[in-house]
Image (spheres, rainbow, N blue to C red):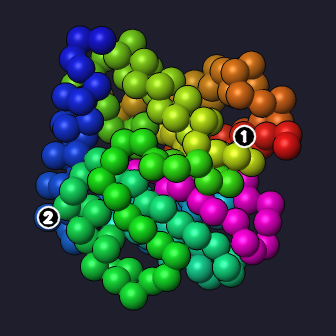
Amino acid sequence: MEKSKSDLLAEVADYYSVKLAEHGATPRGVDWNGEESQMLRFEQLTRVIRQPRGFSINDLGCGYGALLDCLRSKYQDFTYTGCDVSRDMIIAARSRHATSRYVQFVVAAVPPAMTDYGIASGIFNVRLGHGDAEWWDYFQETLDVLDRTSRHGFAFNCLTSYSDAERMRTYLYYADPCALFTHCKRRYSRNVSLLHDYGLYEFTILVRKEI
């Protein structure tokens, strides 16, 4: 890789810290357009969860903890760990959820422990000045992290390479959904779902493990 992984993560952390400072603990503060699309995104990602209660979950790239709000509206009796490389995001998340039980937020690129499920929303989109090969190396390493820290399965989303050309931006990474489906199928599990039908310029992949 042209730069070390720590340098890459530091650049990403700085990018999101600036967004948070500009827009606060809102969808725009984590570089999404608005709350409606954010909730639609979470609906896809949480489809990996098969237990109505009593599960544990890692939220990798948790931002200010918006996914936790979605989880609370759907599930009961779960434990949650949010991880983010931006210290400012973790401070915001801890402030928003200061009274929450069975919840922790940590500054980290790797979850501190294995949980039943892992979710990563939006962390593969903003590559800044990193090339395709360098970003793909980081992408694969992070998927491996999700795999080894998730007992029952994990889910993640990406901007799609099927996006309209005039809408694509050079600082963003657009992944090939078919190639990623194949990668996950061959490397992680036989039970993989590709969701590319919910109206956004992105897709979601669910990886379910046989236990």
- Reply above or below: 201 against 132: below
- Provide the secondary structure element on which disc 1 rests: strand
Q: The residue under label 2 is which amino acid type?
A: Ala
Q: Earlier in the sequence, mark 2 or mark 1?
A: 2
Percent of width and height locating residue 148:
60, 36
Q: Quadrant of the N terminus?
A: top left
- Reply above or below: 123 against 173: below
Which residue lies under the disc numbered 2?
21
Residue at image point 44% right, 20% down = 136
Q: Is residue 30 visible?
A: yes
Report the magenta residues as a range.
48-61
Which residue lies under the disc numbered 1?
207
Percent of width and height locating residue 111:
46, 48
Q: Quadrant of residue 179?
A: top right
- Provide the secondary structure element on which disc 2 rests: helix
Q: Is residue 44 visible?
A: no
